[in-house]
Image (cartoon, rainbow, N blue to C red):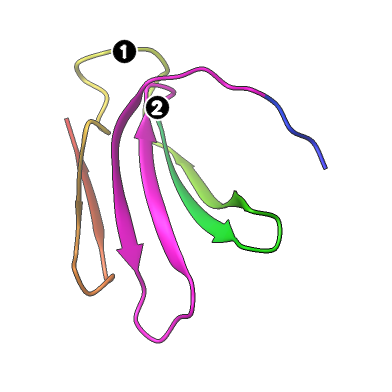
Amino acid sequence: MFLYLDYSLLFGSGLLIVVLSSADYIVVGSDSGRIVILEYNANKNMFEKVHQETFGKSGCRRIVPGQYLAIDPKGRAVMIGT
């Protein structure tokens, strides 16, 4: 198991609840130009990365989306915006 510190700015985050699933997920957008879906693992007492998608260049730029996250209450969709 590898643990490391990472310093970044979190632009937006939200809770994603998938229907008929026992797990809840957190969606995080950051200044790295990525959106990451994290799942909480109670056995390890930490979040684990489920999916990571790159959608822009790194750094705090006005043209890179990720600052605003809109999540469907039924867990069907996630929308990112600038």
Q: Quadrant of residue 2?
A: top right
Residue 14, numbered circle = none
Please state if 28 lies on the left or on the right of 42 as rendered. left
Alpha carbon separation for disc pair 1 and 2: 9 Å
- Number of labels in the image equals 2
Q: Quadrant of residue 50?
A: bottom right
Label 1 or label 2, whichever comes before in sequence order = 2
Queried whether the magenta region covers residue 80, the answer comes back as: no
Q: Quadrant of the C terminus?
A: top left
Q: Position of residue 65 (x, y in %)?
A: 24, 31
Q: Considering the numbered disc 2 on the image, is that residue within a helix, a strand or a loop?
A: loop
Classify 10 Å Cα crowding around label 2: few (below 14), some (14-19), many (20 and above).
many
Residue nearest the viewer, comparing 60 with 9: 9
Q: Quadrant of residue 40?
A: bottom right
Q: Amino acid at mark 1?
A: Cys
In this rendering, the answer to whether 74 lies above or below 64 is: below
Residue located 37% across and 49% down the image = 27
Residue located 62% across and 63% down the image = 42
Q: Position of residue 36 (x, y in %)?
A: 45, 44
Q: Considering the numbered disc 1 on the image, is that residue within a helix, a strand or a loop?
A: loop
Residue located 43% across and 60% down the image = 25
In this rendering, the answer to whether 62 lies above or below 46 is: above
In this rendering, the answer to whether 52 lies above or below 59 is: below
Specify the segment rendered in magenta: 5-33
Please state if 28 lies on the left or on the right of 43 as rendered. left
Q: Which residue is mark 2?
A: 33
Residue 60, numbered circle = 1
Please state if 27 lies on the left or on the right of 80 as rendered. right
